[in-house]
Amino acid sequence: MSKYNLHPTQVEGEYLLDVQTDLLDVQSTRMMVPVLPQAAVPNAVRSLHPAFDMDGKMFVMATHLMGAVPKAALRPPIRNFAEHGDQITRALDFLFQGY
Protein backbone atom coordinates (compact mmCIF):
# COMPACT_ATOMS: atom_id res chain seq x y z
CA MET A 1 0.00 0.00 0.00
CA SER A 2 1.46 3.35 -1.07
CA LYS A 3 -1.29 5.72 0.05
CA TYR A 4 -0.26 7.75 3.10
CA ASN A 5 3.38 6.72 2.81
CA LEU A 6 5.77 9.47 3.87
CA HIS A 7 8.89 9.77 1.71
CA PRO A 8 11.99 11.83 2.54
CA THR A 9 13.11 14.35 -0.06
CA GLN A 10 16.60 15.48 -0.98
CA VAL A 11 16.14 18.36 1.47
CA GLU A 12 16.77 17.38 5.09
CA GLY A 13 13.59 17.65 7.17
CA GLU A 14 11.19 17.86 4.21
CA TYR A 15 8.94 15.02 3.13
CA LEU A 16 6.37 14.03 0.52
CA LEU A 17 3.08 12.42 1.55
CA ASP A 18 1.41 10.07 -0.93
CA VAL A 19 -2.32 10.88 -1.14
CA GLN A 20 -3.25 8.90 -4.27
CA THR A 21 -5.52 5.87 -4.15
CA ASP A 22 -3.73 2.59 -4.68
CA LEU A 23 -6.36 1.70 -7.31
CA LEU A 24 -4.39 3.95 -9.69
CA ASP A 25 -1.03 2.38 -8.95
CA VAL A 26 -0.56 1.51 -12.63
CA GLN A 27 0.24 5.17 -13.33
CA SER A 28 3.89 6.24 -13.45
CA THR A 29 3.28 9.11 -11.01
CA ARG A 30 1.81 9.55 -7.54
CA MET A 31 0.00 12.62 -6.16
CA MET A 32 2.15 13.93 -3.36
CA VAL A 33 1.78 16.67 -0.77
CA PRO A 34 4.84 18.25 0.84
CA VAL A 35 5.12 17.85 4.61
CA LEU A 36 7.29 20.70 5.84
CA PRO A 37 8.55 22.04 9.16
CA GLN A 38 5.87 24.21 10.73
CA ALA A 39 8.00 27.35 10.34
CA ALA A 40 8.02 26.84 6.55
CA VAL A 41 4.23 27.35 6.38
CA PRO A 42 3.75 30.54 8.44
CA ASN A 43 0.21 31.31 7.22
CA ALA A 44 -1.14 27.81 7.76
CA VAL A 45 -4.93 27.44 7.60
CA ARG A 46 -5.93 24.73 10.07
CA SER A 47 -8.45 23.07 7.71
CA LEU A 48 -6.01 23.06 4.80
CA HIS A 49 -2.73 22.45 6.58
CA PRO A 50 -3.00 19.75 9.26
CA ALA A 51 -0.06 19.56 11.64
CA PHE A 52 1.72 16.38 12.69
CA ASP A 53 4.15 15.70 15.51
CA MET A 54 7.06 13.63 14.26
CA ASP A 55 9.57 12.70 16.92
CA GLY A 56 8.83 15.85 18.92
CA LYS A 57 8.99 18.22 15.94
CA MET A 58 5.93 19.81 14.33
CA PHE A 59 5.36 19.45 10.60
CA VAL A 60 2.59 20.80 8.39
CA MET A 61 0.94 19.20 5.38
CA ALA A 62 1.35 21.89 2.70
CA THR A 63 -1.78 20.80 0.82
CA HIS A 64 -1.77 23.83 -1.48
CA LEU A 65 1.57 22.64 -2.93
CA MET A 66 0.31 19.19 -3.99
CA GLY A 67 1.55 17.81 -7.29
CA ALA A 68 2.37 14.70 -9.30
CA VAL A 69 5.77 13.13 -8.75
CA PRO A 70 7.27 10.32 -10.86
CA LYS A 71 7.40 7.11 -8.84
CA ALA A 72 11.00 6.62 -9.94
CA ALA A 73 11.95 9.88 -8.17
CA LEU A 74 10.60 8.80 -4.78
CA ARG A 75 12.90 7.59 -2.04
CA PRO A 76 11.77 4.65 0.09
CA PRO A 77 9.08 5.60 2.62
CA ILE A 78 10.05 6.13 6.25
CA ARG A 79 6.55 5.71 7.74
CA ASN A 80 2.88 5.51 6.92
CA PHE A 81 0.33 8.13 8.02
CA ALA A 82 -2.78 5.93 7.64
CA GLU A 83 -3.74 6.77 11.23
CA HIS A 84 -4.14 10.40 10.06
CA GLY A 85 -6.17 9.41 6.99
CA ASP A 86 -9.35 11.25 8.02
CA GLN A 87 -7.45 14.46 8.76
CA ILE A 88 -5.58 14.22 5.45
CA THR A 89 -8.79 13.59 3.50
CA ARG A 90 -10.49 16.58 5.17
CA ALA A 91 -7.59 18.82 4.08
CA LEU A 92 -7.89 17.58 0.49
CA ASP A 93 -11.66 18.08 0.57
CA PHE A 94 -11.13 21.63 1.81
CA LEU A 95 -8.69 22.30 -1.04
CA PHE A 96 -11.09 21.05 -3.72
CA GLN A 97 -14.54 21.70 -2.23
CA GLY A 98 -14.01 24.51 0.27
CA TYR A 99 -15.38 22.50 3.18
Image (cartoon, helix red, strand yellow):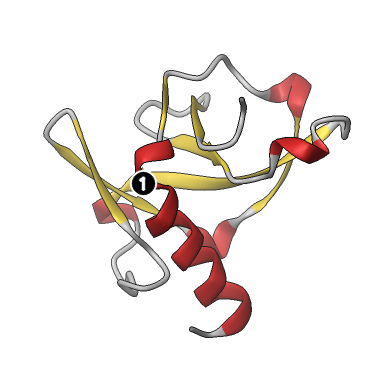
**Where is residue 2 shown, x and y percent of the image?**
62, 28
**Where is residue 79 shown, x and y percent of the image?**
40, 23
Q: Is residue 63 left or right of residue 41?
A: right
As displayed, is residue 1 above or below residue 66? above
Report the residue marked by disc 1.
84
- The amino acid sitting under disc 1 is His
Q: Is residue 87 left or right of residue 31?
A: left
At horizontal 52% and vertical 39% (from top left) the residue drawn is 17
At horizontal 61% and vertical 25% (from top left) the residue drawn is 1
As displayed, is residue 82 above or below residue 85? above
**Where is residue 21 shown, x and y percent of the image?**
69, 43
Quarter occupied by residue 46: bottom left
At horizontal 38% and vertical 58% (from top left) the residue drawn is 87
> For numbered disc 1, what is the local secondary structure?
helix
Quarter occupied by residue 30: top right
At horizontal 59% and vertical 46% (from top left) the residue drawn is 19
Q: Nearer the viewer, residue 67 or 19?
A: 19
Are there few (<14), some (14-19), or many (20+) residues within 10 Å of tag 1?
A: few
**Where is residue 88 shown, x and y percent of the image?**
45, 55
Q: Nearer the viewer, residue 99 or 72?
A: 99
Q: Is residue 44 left or right of residue 23?
A: left
Q: Is residue 54 left or right of residue 2?
A: left
Q: Nearer the viewer, residue 63 or 36?
A: 63
